[in-house]
Image (cartoon, rainbow, N blue to C red):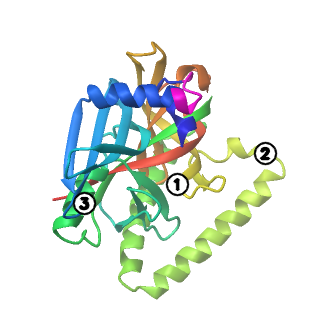
Amino acid sequence: MHQYFRAVGFSNLKSLHQLDQVQKELRHNPDRRIVVSRSLFTSLVQLDKEYGDGIGISVIGEMNAEGEFLIEHSFPFVTPGNYVYSDEVHVDQLNDRSGYYGMIDNINLSVIFSLINIATLTDHQWRQPLPATLSVRLSGLCLGADILLPLMKTEQDLQYESDRMRDELATIHLIRHGNQELLNKMMMREMDMKDTIDHRIDTEDVLSIVDSSMIPSGLQSDVYDIIGTILNVNLVQNRKTGEEVYLLDVACLYYVIRIAVNKQDLLGKPEIGRRFRGVTWLQGEAILR
């Protein structure tokens, strides 16, 4: 995921040598340092440094009993907003490196994301098994996005969509508890909606129809092509590089995701109510109680 450093204002970070220099600086001057037990003889260390309000880099490494520290990997991160999701959120550990991925198990779409608070999860797992489900806040990194005008909607349209979303979430809750009849009705409704969209696409552009979607993109399971409505806009500056980064709270389907995109990679002016479209690497912060 080295290419995503660009999204937090490191567009000139293009080689492992440059990355090594940033990691060395971060090791000597982190904003947060968390050391947790991994085994009887080793500890996992997570070093975080914010280079702007809500954007930064995290370094994950291992420290032995003699205090020797070896970097395993690093990644850019965006601090999520305050929107919390706690319905059927599952967490599992990666096999190839120190890290975790999460999944929101939704009837319509299971959303997969990488977790950024690795040390916290490792510490909890060292003491006891992770809970079967937990709460999470979502964020994301985007390398290039377009700003689209909003769809024309009346007050009645907005009220209808709000009621439909609330009813759909209630229906999903009942389906999870074994209501097969509602599951069949939802499947039929989805098929009817697909037929309607297929018919409209013959004469209309897809972006004049769809105002919210999340489609898996590429080979990475946690990367999605996202279309959503912008709820909040914040422009921050990377203190090290001087590059400007937009932080956009985007409402997509059932979720609100705080997405970071480099200002130079954003086509159009982001404003509240307009739509965002971009391929986004999803991240999440697990909340353990």
Q: Which residue is mark 1?
A: 222
Position of 217 compared to 60: left or right?
right
- Is residue 258 placed above or below 149 in the rendered structure? below
The span picked out in magenta is 11-17
Front residue of 18 and 166: 18
**Gap between marks 3 and 1 measured at Cα:** 26 Å
Q: Residue at x 35, y 82 (%)?
A: 177
Q: Check the image and name the residue furthest to the right.
A: 202
Cβ atoms under marks 3 and 1 closer than 8 Å: no
Type of amino acid at the residue the image marks with label 2: Glu
Residue 283 is labelled as: none
For the residues carrying marks 3 and 2, which lies nearer the camera in this image?
3
Residue occupying the far top of the picture: 242
Front-most of 262 and 155? 262
Q: Quadrant of the N terminus?
A: top right
- Image check: 218 left or right of 251? right
Q: Residue 136 appears at what percent x and percent y? A: 31, 54
State the separation of the CA atoms marked 3 and 2. 55 Å
**Along the line of sight, which residue is nearer the eye, 165 or 256?**
256
Q: Which residue is mark 2?
A: 204
Looking at the image, is mark 2 or mark 1 earlier in the sequence? 2
In the image, farthest residue toward the front: 66
Q: N-terminal of the two: label 3 or label 2?
A: 3
Q: What's under tag 3, amino acid-wise?
A: Arg
Q: Residue at x 39, y 31 (%)?
A: 23
Residue of label 3: 38
